[in-house]
Every structure is written in C-alpha cells, then in structure tokens.
C-alpha cells in the first residue's frame, strides 16, 4: 500500500494528505452528529410503540399497588383476625358465620376486579371453609418438594410481603385450568404472632394489555421482574424457546443482536420493566430516508474537499519543486556523492533515499564507537588482572615445597600454592564462586600463620546453589584483607570474620562481616572514592573492587557498607547470577 502511494504524482499525494486533514474533523463531527441523531431516528421509526409500552407498564404497576393495598386492608381486619385466632374451636354456627365474613370480604375487594382472587390459610385449621379458607396442607401441595419459594413464604414476618409469579389453578384443581398468576403473600394475626397466611393473586396476562399494541412481525415482548432478590424473565409475545432466550439474554446483559430495544420501567417494583425487542430490519426500514440524506451530504462534502485539495496542490507544486531540488543537492554534498538529483513529480523520493543513507552511516559510526568502548573495557580489565598473575612466585613455591621436611611449613606452603593456583586459573578472568571462596579460605590461613593472629578466627556460610555461578576473579580478597588489616588486627580482643553468600532473586549477595573497630562515614567515603594503590596487602583496595564490578556488571551493582566505630563492619557485595 505504501509503495502504491509513493508511485503517485507529487500533486496527487499532496492533495490526498490535505483531504485527509479535512476528512478527520469531518469524521469526528459526523460520528457525533450520527450518534446524537440515530436514537432520534429510531424513536421516530418506532412511532407510538414506546408510549404504548409506558401505558402498559403504568397499568401493571397500578394493578400491583392495588393488590398490595387490598392485601394490607384485609390483613388488618379485626373481625377476620378474631375469627381466625379461634378457628380450632369453632362450632357449626361460628363456622358458617366465618365463611360468610370471608365471602363478604372477598366480594368487596373483587367488586372492581373480578380477576382478583383472595385466599386464607389459617395455621390451626384442619379443614377447608368454602372457596375462601384452606388448610396449609392444601397450600403446600401446590409446590414441589424443597421449593425455596415455599420456604420464603412460610418464614414471612407480620407485615412483610412476598411477590411471585406462579403456575397455579384457582378452579378446583382442574389441570386444564392451570394458569400463570401474579401472587402476593403476607401473614395476619395478633401482634407478634401470625395466625394465618393471606394470598391475593391475579392472572398475569390480565395485568398487561398487549392486544392493543399490534406489534410488527418478528417482535418480542416480555417482562423482567425483580422478585425476592431474583431476576425473572417472562415472554408475553413471541414464539418458541429462541424468543425467550433472546429476551433473557437482553435482561441479563443488556445486549441482543439483530434487535432494537424499547424499555419501560414498572413503578413500585425496582428493577422490573416491560421490554419490547423490534427486529433491526424493521427499524432500519423506518430510518432509511434519514440515512440516505446523511450519506448524500457526506459524499457532497468529500467531493468538495477533494477538488479544493487538488487545486491547492497545483498552486503549491511549483514553489515546492524548486525547494526539493535545493535539498537534494545539499544532501549530495553532505554524503560526498555525485548522484544525479531527481527532479519532478517524485523528487521527495530522492530526499528519502539520501536521508536513509545518512541514517545508516550514522548508525554504523555509533556501532563502531560502541565496539571501541567494549574493547577499551576489556583491555582495562586485562591490565588490572595482570597485576595479580605471579607465575614466577607460584613455580618457585612449588619447587621449595619438595625440599622442606617440616610438616607445618609444608602445610603453609601448600596453602600458598593453592592460593596462587586459583589466582592464576590458567589465565581465566572469570572463575566459579566456589574457587573464589576457596582462595579466601587459603588467604586467611596464610595471614593467621604469617602474623601469628591466634586471636582471630573465621567462618563461612555459603549456599550450595551459589557455588556453581561465576564471578570476576579476586573481588572478595581485598574486602577480606581490609577487614583483617584495619578492623581486627588493631584490636586486642577476640576477632572473627564471617563470609556469607546467598541467592537474592536474580542476584547473588556476598556479606563480609567483622566485629572489629568499625569505621566512620568519612572513612567509608574515602575507601570508595580514593584508589588504594599499592598500600594494601592485596594490591587492589576496595576502590578497585568497586571499579571492576561497575565495569563488568554495570553501575547498578557494587559495594555497600554498614559500620559504626566500635561496632564492627558489614560489607555487602551484589552481583548478577551468571552461570558457568
């Protein structure tokens, strides 16, 4: 795609770029305008359906409120409460009077709504009374075993309500008469005690008027009710399980592919709503004219932008071409090349080629500088290493050892030979940590023997997995030497040096700790900033150790001191984990 663009003439490319800069704000404006108007177009395409949904949801809410008000009114009737409280000991006359009271109450509350049904379920009743009062056993038989809804209803407190939608029969248990009913339950009785379960119910379909809607073909009408903390979906219009699945998916996720949704909330039931899903094709058909008008305006604007951009590029081309010729000639001078400049419609290509060559030349230059720096560091390391390669001394000691008969002298010479054997390491700069630790052990043995330091002891705590990693040779000895010479030898009390090594994530941490005289912060700063030269026994000094660590591992690694006068010194050396 990029190659095709560069093969176009300069004028065309300029006009395309100018057109893009004009199209970007146009696209932003168009997207905002389309987003704001699209919903208006959809609402207009739906016509009166949103208003009909609002009327239906309002009607459903009124029916629910009416049922609950009547339920509250009946549950507080003193005469009914009194009769129910003594239902276990009723005689025949009292039973007839009780049934008559229930009939009168039922007739009064259903006078304006013959679809409403009311039932009493006294707790202490062992028989049914007419078509109004039933035993709790009759009620329980309408539920499956271990039904959670039944458990919620039976655990009701006085004054509390349970709303639900149930598939039940109110026509003397004739199976063909089973219907979906909206039910509300409460308990009634004396204060602090429930004597009876009160139920009011109404056919669910009678609470919503869907006949007057005359929905478009393929629409799905349903309801989402939030009852007892659970969301329940009910299909009112639409066919098959697929329609129910689409409606339930919308209620759970708020999304439905291929449909436009219109929703109306139900007053008095938080989280409940009536939903109608209209086929996307029906809505698009209604807004087709608005979309075509919008597209025509966009096309006319784009044509205007393209024409104006091309005319502007023609006006700019002549002046820019002369400038491009000058730039090409100057780049040839910088690159010391005598190429023929590319003049004309595609002379930007000449500038691009020359700048690429200039960038490559610069990259090659910096790559060489980096190689020079690496070589410089390597040579510096080799110079430092040469200061601790005493071949002659090692060979001489080996010869002397075979001529000495005293065991303690031969043991000391053996330690010295092993020490220098590790130092030489066949000329290797990098050795295993296990070898570095062995060299420190031999060094301490030699120092204690040579200077009769019987009051000084040492110990090692080295993790096994540390030993196989590598280290730049001779990093630890100057630190140990500093602790021995300046920390322990100058005191008369017992002294000890601890050398520890452990793994810390991707690093290795060495700790050299002594209980000597300690140091001040000024002395620590001096050690890390002033080269020790040849004044120390190891010939390196702490400063050279810090320099070698930074040179080989990087400036994020190195030494850290923690010390106070009279409290000893702890030196921490951190290096990265590098395998053998």
Image (cartoon, rainbow, N blue to C red):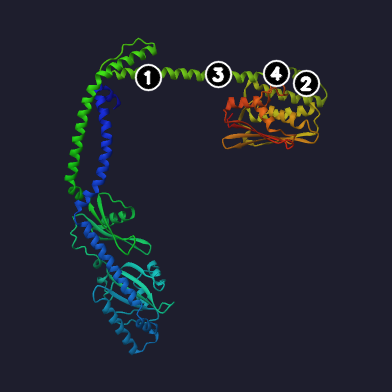
Foreground mark, 2 or 3, reads 3
Q: Mark 4 points at which residue?
A: 390
- The residue lying at 61 percent from left, 29 percent from top is 470
Say few, some or many: other residues with alpha carbon within 10 Å of mark 2 (under 14 / 14 to 19 / 20 or more).
some
Picture mark count: 4
In the structure shown, which secondary structural element does the residue marked by tag 4 occupy? loop
Residue 411's x, y, as percent? Answer: 78, 26
Q: Which of marks 3 and 4 is nearer the N terminus?
A: 3
Compute the Cα span from label 1 to label 2. 68 Å
Compute the Cα span from label 4 to label 2. 17 Å
Contact between marks 4 and 1 (CB within 8 A): the answer is no
Query: In the displayed structure, would residue 284 be above or below residue 323?
Result: below
Contact between marks 3 and 1 (CB within 8 A): the answer is no
Foreground mark, 3 or 1, reads 1
Residue 553 vs residue 399, the one in the foreground: 553
Q: Which of marks 4 and 2 is nearer the N terminus?
A: 4
Q: Name the residue under label 2.
A: 401
Q: Which of marks 2 and 3 is nearer the N terminus?
A: 3
Compute the Cα span from label 4 to label 1. 53 Å
Please give left or right for residue 452 compared with residue 418 in the image. right
Q: Can residue 9 be seen in this view?
A: no
Q: Earlier in the sequence, mark 1 or mark 2?
A: 1
Q: Can residue 77 be seen in this view?
A: yes
Foreground mark, 1 or 2, reads 1
């Amino acid at each position: 795609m990029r190659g095709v663009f560069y093969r176009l003439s300069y004028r065309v490319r300029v006009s395309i770029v100018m057109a893009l800069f004009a199209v970007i704000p146009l696209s932003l404006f168009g997207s905002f305008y389309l987003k704001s108007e699209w919903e208006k177009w959809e609402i207009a395409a739906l016509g009166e359906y949103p208003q009909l949904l609002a009327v239906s949801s309002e009607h459903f809410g009124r029916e629910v409120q009416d049922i609950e008000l009547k339920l509250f009114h009946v549950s507080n009737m003193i005469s009914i409460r009194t009769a129910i409280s003594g239902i276990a000991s009723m005689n025949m006359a009292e039973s007839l009077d009780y049934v008559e009271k229930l009939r009168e109450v039922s007739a009064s509350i259903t006078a304006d709504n013959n679809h409403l049904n009311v039932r009493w379920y006294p707790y202490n009743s062992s028989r049914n009374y007419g078509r109004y009062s039933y035993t709790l056993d009759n009620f329980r038989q309408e539920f499956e075993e271990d039904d959670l809804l039944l458990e919620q209803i039976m655990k009701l407190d006085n004054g509390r309500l349970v709303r639900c939608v149930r598939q039940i029969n109110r026509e003397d248990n004739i199976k063909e008469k089973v219907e979906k009913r909206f039910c509300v339950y409460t308990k009634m009785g004396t204060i602090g005690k429930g004597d009876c379960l009160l139920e009011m119910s109404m056919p669910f379909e009678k609470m919503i008027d869907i006949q007057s809607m005359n929905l478009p073909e393929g629409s799905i009408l349903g309801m989402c009710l939030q009852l007892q903390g659970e969301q329940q979906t009910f299909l009112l219009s639409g066919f098959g399980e697929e329609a129910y699945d689409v409606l339930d998916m919308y209620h759970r996720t708020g999304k439905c592919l291929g449909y436009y949704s219109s929703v109306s909330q139900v007053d008095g039931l938080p989280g409940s709503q009536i939903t109608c899903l209209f086929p996307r094709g029906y809505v698009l058909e209604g807004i087709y004219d608005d979309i075509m008008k919008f597209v025509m305006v966009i096309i006319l604007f784009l044509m205007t932008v393209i024409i104006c951009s091309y005319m502007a590029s023609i006006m700019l081309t002549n002046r820019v071409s002369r400038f491009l010729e000058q730039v090409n000639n100057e780049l040839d001078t910088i690159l010391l090349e005598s190429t023929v400049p590319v003049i004309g419609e595609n002379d930007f290509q000449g500038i691009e080629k020359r700048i690429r060559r200039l960038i490559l030349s610069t990259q090659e230059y910096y790559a060489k500088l980096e190689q020079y720096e690496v070589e410089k560091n390597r040579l510096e390391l080799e110079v430092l290493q040469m200061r601790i390669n005493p071949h002659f001394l090692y060979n001489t000691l080996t010869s002397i050892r075979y001529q000495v008969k005293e065991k303690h002298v031969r043991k000391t010479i053996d330690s010295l030979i092993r020490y220098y054997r590790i130092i030489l390491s066949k000329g290797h700069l990098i050795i295993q940590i296990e070898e570095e630790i062995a060299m420190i052990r031999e060094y301490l043995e030699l120092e204690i023997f040579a200077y009769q330091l019987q009051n000084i002891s040492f110990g090692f705590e080295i993790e096994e997995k540390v030993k196989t990693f590598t280290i730049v040779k001779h990093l630890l000895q100057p630190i140990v030497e500093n602790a021995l010479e300046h920390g322990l030898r100058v005191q008369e009390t017992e002294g000890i040096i601890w050398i520890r090594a452990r793994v810390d994530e991707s690093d290795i941490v060495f700790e050299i700790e002594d209980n000597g005289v300690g140091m001040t912060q000024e002395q620590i700063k001096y050690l890390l900033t002033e080269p020790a030269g040849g004044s120390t026994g190891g010939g390196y000094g702490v400063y050279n150790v810090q320099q070698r660590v930074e040179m080989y591992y990087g400036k994020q690694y190195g030494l850290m001191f923690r010390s106070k006068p009279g409290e000893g010194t702890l030196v921490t050396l951190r290096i990265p984990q590098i395998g053998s």
